[in-house]
Image: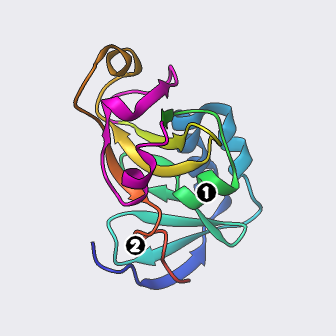
Amino acid sequence: MKKIVVKKRHSIRKSQGVDLLLRLEEQIGSSANLFRADMIEVLETNADVSLFMVAKKPLLMDTGAWVFPTLKGAVQVPFPERRVTVDAGAIPYVVNGADIMRPGIVAVTDDVKAGCPVQIVDERHGKPLAIGIALFDAPDMRASTAGKMVKKFHHVGDEIWNMEI
């Protein structure tokens, strides 16, 4: 992907903010309340994803199909939902943008659904390393022994992470 350039930024109406948080609640449940703010701004960019500034930080992204915290959002406002935990051996690959393979996964929360966003976290500290799209539901992921389980969407050092505002 090319470098993301912010063309405009403006605050959204309260009703739009409520809709945004309702869509976020569909993904992460009551933890969506952690992202409430008096002012939410939308960034108009050249990317396929819409980015939202909460408290002047790019904490949320909207693809049209779903709303989910950005990686910075997951780091700054930790939430327990939608987690795929990987072992220490997978960390260097994940932070460099690799998809998540089954041998590196040590735990999956029950709310992981195929086609929905998840946060990939490290086993030791529980710190988010990337945001991905689950390719299988949680039970199928646990039952599997090999193959790709999560497609990478956003990781440390990518264009969303390095975006200058």
Task: From the viewer's perspective, tell me whether residue 79 is left or right of residue 38.
Answer: left
Q: Which mark is residue 73?
A: 1
Instruction: Check disc 2 and report the residue beneath it.
Output: 159
Q: Is residue 143 above or below residue 5?
A: above
Quadrant where the C terminus is found in the figure: bottom right
Q: Position of residue 10 (x, y in %)?
A: 58, 78
Q: CA distance from mark 2 to mark 1?
A: 15 Å
Instruction: Looking at the picture, tell me which residue is in the foreground, 131 or 33.
Output: 131
Tell me the magenta residue range: 87-115
Name above or below for residue 121 compared with residue 37.
Answer: above
Residue type at mark 1 is: Gly
Dividing the picture into quadrants, the one containing residue 25 is: top right
Q: Is residue 91 magenta?
A: yes
The quadrant in which the N terminus is found is bottom left
Residue 128 counted in the magenta span? no
Residue at image position (34%, 58%) is: 97
Q: How many marks?
A: 2
For label 2, the crowd category at 10 Å Cα-Cα, with few meaning under 14, some 14 to 19 and many 20 or more, is: some
Type of the residue with mark 2: Glu
Quarter of the image holding residue 55? bottom right
Mark linked to residue 64? none
Mark 1 neighbour density, 10 Å: few (under 14) some (14–19) many (20 or more): many
| Residue 82 image offset from top left, x and y in percent | 52, 33
Among numbered discs 2 and 1, the one appearing first in the sequence: 1
Foreground residue among 103 and 153 = 103
